[in-house]
Amino acid sequence: MKVWLWLLGIIKRRFNFLQNANLEIRRYLIVGLGATVIDSGVLYLLMTYTDWSRLIAAPIGFTAGLTWSLIWSILWVFPMYKKRPWWQGLAGFGVIGIFGLLINEAIIGATPSSYLWLSKVISIVMVSIWNFIAKKVILFNN
């Protein structure tokens, strides 16, 4: 009997984790969409109205989107994180963001200028996957 209760407890904990992860993924997608709009919007504005290189404009847009993501990840996506001071995870968030920026720059830098927006779409997908997994495992785990 105790074995069944133990197994039921494990299943219940796993199910609750999946429910939380499902909600977090949906919220992260919404926040990620906002970060993507900000990132791509800043990149578009800098590429259209300045003579800056795409390798300079892309990190500026990326940083603007990352800032949006930081704020909303703490406030809404991973609400249990509010139990700690926000600045404690800032360094970890920054390191995860730097790796994301390196992925972004590698993909954009490896493609010709004529394929900027295609490479940006590929970068968005790859960096989003990296960011969610890294944030969930490193910063916002229970």
Image: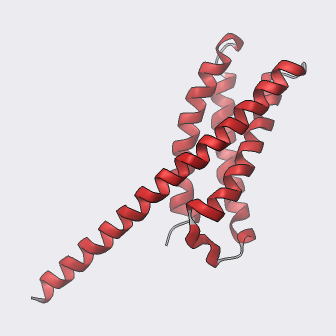
Quarter assignment of residue 12: bottom left
Q: Would you say 5 lies left or right of 91 here? A: left
Quarter assignment of residue 102: top right
Residue 80 drawn at (x, y percent): 56, 72
Q: How many marks?
A: 0
Residue displayed at 71% across by 58% down: 71
Q: Is residue 50 above or below residue 74?
A: above
Residue 117 drawn at (x, y percent): 65, 20
> Looking at this view, is 107 or 125 the one in front?
125
Task: Pick out the residue farthest to the bottom.
Answer: 2
Q: Would you say 124 lies left or right of 12 here? A: right
- Looking at the rendered image, the quarter that the N terminus falls into is bottom left
Q: Would you say 134 lies left or right of 115 here? A: left
Quarter assignment of residue 81: bottom right
Q: Is residue 10 above or below residue 133?
A: below
Residue 99 drawn at (x, y percent): 65, 45
